[in-house]
Image (tube, rainbow, N blue to C red):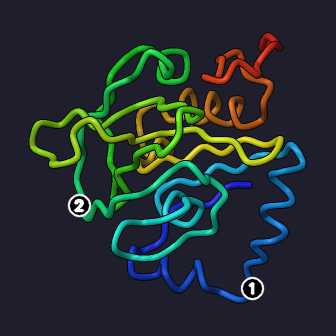
Amino acid sequence: MYLSWLEVKQVFNYINNDDVNVAYLKSFVASGKGFMGICAGAYSAAEYTDNWYYGWGLALNVVNLPYVDVGNVTIQTTSSGTEIMGGTDRWISPINGPAMYSTDYSTVTFATYADCNSSYKGYAAIIGDHYGEGRIVLSSVHPELSSPPADVLVNLIMWVYNGSYINDTNGTDTNAYT
């Protein structure tokens, strides 16, 4: 399942939309499926956005900080994100996506904000979490708008799919990517 861009002012309305079956989403992911949320999807799926609202709680160990900014920023690949990001830092657009932090050791931070002009330097830009048997990736930045976008998106989808060659921090991955 994939959810991407919405205007920040629309996120609150989307989270509280009666047409979104949060119980089904949670069941879907908990059964071993995955969820990838980019921008509005990251706001929606996180447990909480500081001083704004509670999300759907798919990423129980992730808290968002509202990052209301447009234009490109530098994100830095972490050691866990080397395979996903290609081992390079990226100049990429957050378009109001959140800065994120983990409340638990079981998350995997793939990239952090590295821009010295940002008050969120060091916060997660792309983070992975678990819900039941499933996996969640939240990306505050827009890899689908980067050049080339396919490499990062495919690798994130593979991690969510749980067929990834990328180990997660709690050591549950034993399958090699083929």
Say above or below: 23 vs 130: below
Which residue shows up at 80% across the image and 52% down it? 29
Q: Which residue is mark 2?
A: 69
Residue 109 percent location from the top left of the image = 47, 32
Which residue shows up at 38% across the image and 23% down it? 77
Pick the front one: 57 or 79: 57
Tell me the distance, in whole angstroms, between the alpha carbons under discs 1 and 2.
29 Å
- Contact flag, marks 1 and 2 (Cβ < 8 Å): no
5 displayed left or right of 45: left
Q: Amino acid at mark 1?
A: Asp
> What quarter of the picture does the N terminus occupy?
bottom right
Q: Say which label, 1 or 2, has the lower sequence index.
A: 1
Residue 107 percent location from the top left of the image = 56, 35
Q: Which residue is mark 1?
A: 19
Q: Residue furthest left?
A: 117
**Residue 153 badge:** none
For label 2, count other residues whose C-alpha is less than 10 Å away and answer few (under 14), some (14-19) or many (20+): some
Which residue shows up at 73% across the image and 22% down it? 164
Pick the front one: 127 or 7: 127
Q: Amino acid at mark 2?
A: Asp
Which residue shows up at 39% across the image and 81% down it? 9
Residue 165 percent location from the top left of the image = 70, 15
43 displayed left or right of 169: left
Q: Residue furthest right?
A: 31
Q: Quadrant of residue 134?
A: top right
Disc 2 secondary structure class: loop
Say above or below: 60 vs 51: above
Q: Quadrant of residue 117?
A: top left
95 displayed left or right of 71: right
Residue 48 percent location from the top left of the image = 49, 65
Pick the front one: 100 or 1: 100
